[in-house]
Amino acid sequence: MQDAVGKFVLLVPAFAGSALIILILTFLWYEATPIFLAPQGGPSIVIQPIWDPNRDLYGIALFILGSFICTFLAIAMAVPLGIGAAVFLSEFCPPRIRTSLRMIVEMMAAIPSIVYGLWAYIVMVPWIKNSFAPAVQSNPLTAWMPWFQGSTNGLSVLAGGTILAIMLLPTVVAVSDDALRSVPSSYREASLALGATKTETAVKIVVSAAIPGIGAAIVLSLGRAVGETMAVLMVTGNSLQIPFTLLDPAYVMTSIITNQLGYAFVFPLWRSALFAVAFVLLMMSVSFTVIAKWFVKWGMKTRGLV
Amino acid sequence: MSSDSCATSGAANETASSAPEPEIGPTRRSLLWLKSQLLVKTRREAKDLLLKILFAITTLIVILPFFLIVIQLAVTGLSGLTLDLFTTFPGASLTGGIRNAIVGTILLVLVAGGVGIPLSVLGAVYISEYSPPGRIRSTVEFASDVLAGIPSIVFGAFGFAFIVVFLNVGMGLVSGGLTLAFMMMPTVLRTTQEALRQVPVSLREASFALGATKWTTTWRVTIRAAFPGIVTGVLLAIGRVMGETAPLIFTSGNSLTTPTSILGPASWVASLPFTIWAYVSDPRPYLQVKAQSTALALLVMVLAVDVVANYISRKVTRRLV
């Protein structure tokens, strides 16, 4: 008797998560419908670049582009560094140092994004403005590069991408490290027995055996990068323009919601357009999660590790 | 070929040479280890060594920001980290302390934990104790993974549209706490599930053999054995939501004092991350320093929770293994 009741009672919290997801999906969709149905909006807002609520223009392409550029920069920096560190941690590092390094990485993951943002705002932004930009623009080796042109106040996609990369690193390192460590040591022994050096074994055998896990790490961090809010908001400059160079400011999806939802609340179309941005974000994060899970499943199957 | 294997057998050489003389010190042992690592005979070994150094440098670059952030906040923020900062309210000109934010963060975490922890622990108990592995279990696991990936600002927008406006709760402690509770759920659920999975089946079987029902076994035996693991998950989740800003901007409001009621404008509540953001956005220069002191306080709190969580989980793994 008690068991049956208990089972029934526990059913509710078990499906709370699923119910919550359905609730979030329907609610964001419900809030975003007006802009998709209105003559001023429609589904084409996703590819329209001009955002000016005063003239009833609600193109959100600019924010999607801004998010993509920052995310791309962050991934380009975080993935090679993160995988390199993960290889060191799992393959070469003495166990005692490994424990403390893993602890630092876990602490980095725990630092709140507002603290990263604050640091980037008070240290990195002035550094880009006063040191980095003058240095690359006066150095004949780099001055010609199109991505270093233009004047800057430091608030730029470069600052946003770099702080995002720093925030992604713990995820990339931890997940890749776990993936590398789960490769059976017989693989390593076989490779070493064939006369391969330790780095040859690490790069050619262990990393390629761990590709599914590393792929999942990259996709998961993609999702985190696109959805990151506070740090990016504080350093990308939030300017409604297309960033042509690394030193130009940008406006990302999370920032426009944070900055304008408070004001837009009483204007139905404006508010709805912001919820459309949130809906796009939600769809992106859900698909990244699905892809990451699929990646791991596929990799486990093809490598016979199930 | 034989020379190629030299680098790999270096570690073995070192242990062999140090075995007969046990009084060898740690410094000398590391020097010997270093020497064995630096012994290069062929081009392949040189490449091996070079790549190893490169990987080590990469690791240093990866952890460098952690120290840069801690040092920066310590240098600028430490001077402002006085007792007054924690015990006084900011006042109209924001010259005082951050007592409102500290109390607010604790209250928000209490509300979030009060709602989120029971829900997710019970959910985890259901899927790992009551449901057979299969569709139900994978649905719940998938849902919590998706939930874990949803951006914090989306939770904020949802909390605003659903709790604040649609349910007409209004901004304040309840709305902010509930939004944070949603964000806690996936972490607590997955770690609880993991903790329950690590409880040996023999414990449950012993309980059943004594005639206990499933319900009694679950609550008296399984959950007790998994308790430290569950605490770890709860602490990790608390550390995570303590630093969340984006979900609170539209749900918790802000306040210069502590909330005096559960609902209505009197329940508007400040939090540490929100205070940092508000102070940084403010042009007054003394608030920039105060923001860094606040950030240092938040960082110390979050890292302390994280370290305790890791300590518990490490202790538990050692006991189980």
Image: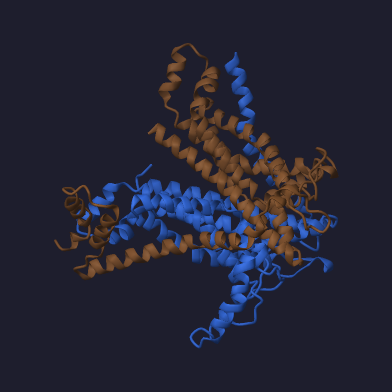
Chain colours: A blue, B brown
The image quadrant where one finds the C terminus of chain A is top left
**Is B2 positioned to the left or the right of B200 in the image?**
left
Using the rendered image of the protein, determine whether residue B219 is visible from the camera's viewpoint.
yes
Residue positioned 57% across, 66% down in the render: A161
Q: Nearer the viewer, residue A1 or B195?
A: B195
Looking at the image, residue B197 sits to the left or right of residue B290; the answer is left
Residue B25 is situated, as x and y percent measured from the top left of the image, at: 26, 52
Relative height, residue B312 to residue A298 (above, below): above
Give the answer, above or below, for where B21 lies relative to B116: below
Q: Nearer the viewer, residue A239 or A294?
A: A239
Residue B320 in the image, given as x and y percentages of width and height: 40, 32
Residue lying furthest left in this view? B2
Q: Quadrant of the N terminus of chain A?
A: top right
* Image-based side of A102 in relation to B38, left or right: right
Asked whether the viewer can see residue A80, the reply is: no
Residue A238 is drawn in which quadrant? bottom right
Please count the marks in the image: 0
